[in-house]
Image: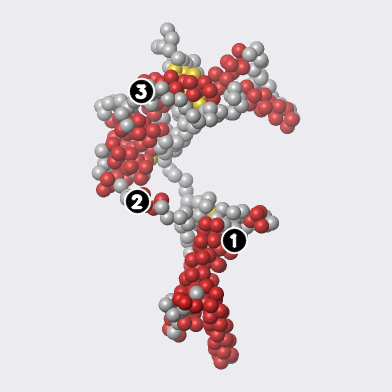
Amino acid sequence: PESKMGGAFCECLASLEAARTLVRSWVVPAIADNALPQGAEACILSFLAIVVFGHVLAAVPLSRIGQNGGAGYNTVVLGYDNSRGEWSLLATTCIFAPFTLVLPLLPPPALCAVALGAVLFVLYYALGMHASHPGGPRAHRIMREPQWKDEMHFMDVGWVCAIAEESHRVTEDKLRNGKRLTGEPAGRQIWYRQHSAKDSAKESCGFNPQANPNPNDTLWRNQRIAAWQAKGKPVPDASWRPSSVLDHVRKAMAWYEVLQADDGHWAGDYGGPHFLMPGLVVVWYITGRESSFLDADQRAAMRHYLLVHQQLDGGWGMHIESPSTMFGSCMCYMALRCLGVGKDHPAMVKGRVFIHSYGGGIYTGSWAKFYMCLLGCMDWEGHHPIPPEMWLPPEW
């Protein structure tokens, strides 16, 4: 049996050698045959496969060639899947299979090492824990719960949401350079405040984060309801309890018709993340604090938003429903300071206590470190280097 296995192995190597010789005659010009070392043809084929599947066929769905199924690794494209960051099974095979042609050139010890490495890789892939497969859920939920002060907060009156062409006019009126916006106005929204004799008044609808940290677009919905009623149209009865599926659909459609913006889109609050608006505030601050960028009313509204979402422990979550985190706390603290809240303000004192109690800003996320470096609050040595040259290599 051992002699038969050895003979079969030798025949396999002989077949690979014949295939390598044939492939070399195809891909290596005769004039360069003596210049290129044996085995270079495998590298050439692998490089060509990377070019074809990594560029030409990247993100090309299999439906283009009459298939609807996946190509392996749960991907549905023929080459490199840009959205998943994965190669298809066909692409992976074409990239690595050429290197089997160099096996006949290896001495027996090297062949044994390659075989052992292949077995270990297969075992690792089948049994190991990969970065893209983190495993099941944690043994227990996060023990900390978000908590806010149980009280109502009210916005200043006069806030209006301008949409579409009106939003362009509002923005252009603030620009001191006289420039006009060139983007598509449909679907655009911007909030601004209309001043009146009642500037000191507050909105009738309040917000209690302890009861529900989501403001639920209350101001926007009230504005749309008022616009709907101004057209003489009745608002659907919220107390009506549908008795059938069709009635449920009718009720939902009736309400969505009221909430639809005049240009046809449906607007929605995007106030959940605590790591987006602070970045905008920092950029506004370091680029000159222009009032045409953020006016006094908008800055006051931002301060109000961030302060009412501060939790009892002094921190902020990564989003409005999250328990306090270093990332959310550092981002919101920086934004409030840039918006003019003094360092001795009670909210700022509580925020620093939370941040310092967990080790300081060095333990926050890279986004927060980046903005702290821009503001001069942290040396660039404290941030992980992100070479911009990394954008130059291909996506794969």
Tell me which amino acid carries mark 3.
Ser
Q: Does 293 sit left or right of 381 as displayed?
A: right
Residue occupying image coordinates x 54% and y 61%: 52
Tell me which amino acid carries mark 2.
Pro
Can you give x and y, in whole percent of width and height, for residue 40 in the image? 46, 74
Vertical side of 4 occupied by 153: above or below: above
Vertical side of 233 occupied by 92: above or below: below
Can you give x and y, in whole percent of width and height, for residue 209 in the image? 45, 28
Can you give x and y, in whole percent of width and height, for residue 70 in the image? 62, 57
Q: Foreground: 146 or 320?
A: 320
Q: Foreground: 3 or 376?
A: 376
Q: Foreground: 61 or 361?
A: 61
Query: Which residue extends farthest bottom?
Result: 3
Can you give x and y, in whole percent of width and height, for residue 365 in the image? 36, 44
Rendered image coloring scheme: secondary structure
Q: Which residue is disc 3 drawn over? A: 291
Mark 2: which secondary structure? loop
Mark 3: which secondary structure? loop
Tell me which amino acid carries mark 1.
Gly
Using the image, tell me which numbered label, if any, was put on residue 147: none
Residue occupying image coordinates x 68% and y 22%: 240
First along the sequence among labels 1 and 3: 1
Using the image, tell me which numbered label, if any, was put on residue 387: 2
Q: CA distance from mark 3 to mark 2?
A: 33 Å
Q: Which residue is disc 1 drawn over? A: 72
Q: CA distance from mark 1 to mark 3?
A: 53 Å
Vertical side of 391 occupied by 319: above or below: above
How many marks the image carries: the answer is 3
**Residue 306 visible here:** yes
Q: CA distance from mark 1 to mark 2?
A: 33 Å
The residue carrying pointer 1 sits among few (fewer than 14), some (14 to 19) or many (20 or more) residues within 10 Å by Cα, namely: some
The residue carrying pointer 3 sits among few (fewer than 14), some (14 to 19) or many (20 or more) residues within 10 Å by Cα, namely: some
